[in-house]
Amino acid sequence: MNAKYIFVAFLAVIAAGAAAQGTPEGDACRKAVAELAKGEIVKMKLKNKNGIDLYEIDVKSPDGVKWEFKCDKATAKILEKEQELPNANHPTFTALKKIDETQARQIALKAQPGTITKVEYEIEKDGTATYEFGIRTSDDQDMEVEVDAATGKIIKTEED
């Protein structure tokens, strides 16, 4: 009988410890993203950019639209929100772009020499259409270069 009480007490201690640990990692960011986009989280990755731990979260909505979010791990604040389009001929992208993909590629490669490994067509949080290029440098570094599809200006260059 004593063994039974000891076992129950042991389980109570374990349960209390688990409750004290709080919610699973990333739940606050999952909740913040769910308020902005309905759909399935298809990818969630923890990264450190400029000393800030953030989650990159990809969501696919029921209508097939893909969204990418960057969420501050500490505050659960959404730092970036982008809509990914399937190609540069998508009506939303076409309505906003002034330069074609060939011109954007040249601009990106001038800013960051290397080999283009991927291209994404995005609508940023502020409604700007951008070409986002993944570029592998000659020293095998993966970089990301965003080019404004209306002005041809570099929006950002960063390590991917």
Image (spheres, rainbow, N blue to C red):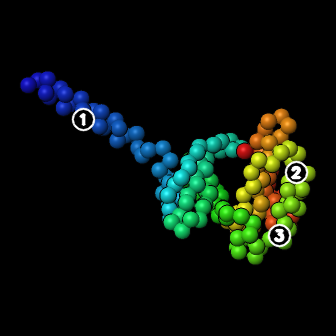
Q: Read off the residue under disc 3.
A: 150
Asked if the residues shown at circle 2 and circle 1 are in contact, with their CB atoms under 8 angstroms apart, the answer is no
Which amino acid lies under the numbered mark 1 shown in the image of this protein? Ala
| Tally of marks | 3
Residue 72 seen in the figure: no
Please state which amino acid type lies under the numbered disc 2: Leu
- Picture coordinates of residue 23 (x, y %)? 42, 46
Q: Secondary structure at mark 2?
A: helix
Looking at the image, which residue is at 89% across and 57% down?
107
Residue nearer the viewer, 155 or 22: 155
* Marking on residue 95: none
Neighbour class for label 1 at 10 Å: few (<14), some, many (≥20)? Answer: few
3 left or right of 59 in image: left
Residue 2's place in the image compared with 131, above or below, is above
Can residue 150 be seen?
yes
Name the residue beneath numbered marker 1: 12
Front: mark 3 or 1: 3
Q: Earlier in the sequence, mark 3 or mark 1?
A: 1
User: Between disc 3 and disc 2, whose residue precedes?
Assistant: 2
**Residue at 62% of width from left, 53% of height from top?**
70
Report the residue marked by disc 2.
109
Q: Secondary structure at mark 1?
A: helix
Q: What separation in Å lies between label 2 and label 1 (alpha carbons)?
A: 60 Å
> Picture coordinates of residue 153 (x, y %)?
86, 62
Q: Is residue 134 left or right of residue 30?
A: right
Q: Is residue 43 placed above or below 120 in the rendered structure?
A: above
Which percent across, then down, holds residue 59?
Answer: 55, 58
